[in-house]
Amino acid sequence: MLPGKTCTETLNYQGNGTRQGSSGEEVTQSRYEVSPMPSLLGFYRLTETVTEGNGKKDCSGDLHEAPGEPVTRFIQFSPKKDQLIVCREESLKACFGPLKRAPQ
């Protein structure tokens, strides 16, 4: 749940390199790759390419990239590896999170 909103965002990353996601009214499917090792700054490079989307707005009110457009983000895990943040650059200046794994 995003702070101050009654909107839920769920991202389900599969070991086969696919991701299903929902955020508000938006539903997407993507392919993704994560670098095997973090950079010297401690960030893993995450590249996602949306393969399918319903074209509706997410929890932030945004419309996301058209299918086929790769997006690169940078993720950093907490010391316990139970949470992560997602950043636009290898910097803590433009990030969201922390994100937590949902109980299964």
Image (cartoon, helix red, strand yellow):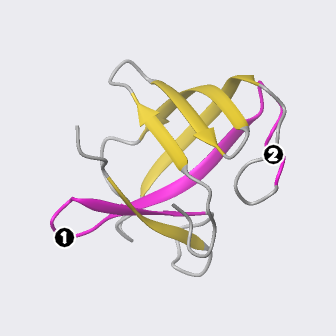
Locate residue 88, reporting x and y percent: 63, 63
Would you call the spot at circle 2 few (<14 residues within 10 Å), some (14-19), or many (20 or more)?
some
Would you call the spot at circle 1 few (<14 residues within 10 Å), some (14-19), or many (20 or more)?
few
How far is mark 2 from mark 1, CA to CA? 33 Å
Is residue 103 shown left or right of residue 87?
A: left
- Residue 55: give its label: none
In percent of the image, x 32 and y 24: which residue is there?
Answer: 15
Is 44 above or below relative to 43? Answer: above
In percent of the image, x 82 and y 53: which residue is there?
Answer: 62
Q: Are marks 2 and 1 in contact (CB under 8 Å)?
A: no
Residue type highlighted by circle 1: Pro
Is 67 above or below relative to 93? Answer: above
Give the residue pinned by disc 1: 79
Which residue is most to the bottom?
93
Is residue 42 shown left or right of residue 12?
A: left
Locate residue 68, reporting x and y percent: 77, 24
Residue 9 falls inside the magenta stretch: no
In percent of the image, x 22 and y 59: which residue is there?
Answer: 82
Which residue is most to the front?
6
Viewer-nearest residue: 33 or 5: 5
Q: How many numbered markers are drawn? A: 2
Mark 1: secondary structure = loop
Give the residue pinned by disc 2: 57
Locate residue 37, reporting x and y percent: 30, 49
The magenta segment: 62-87
Sequence-earlier tag: 2 or 1: 2
Is residue 77 shown left or right of residue 13?
A: left
> Which quarter of the image is occupied by the C terminus?
top left
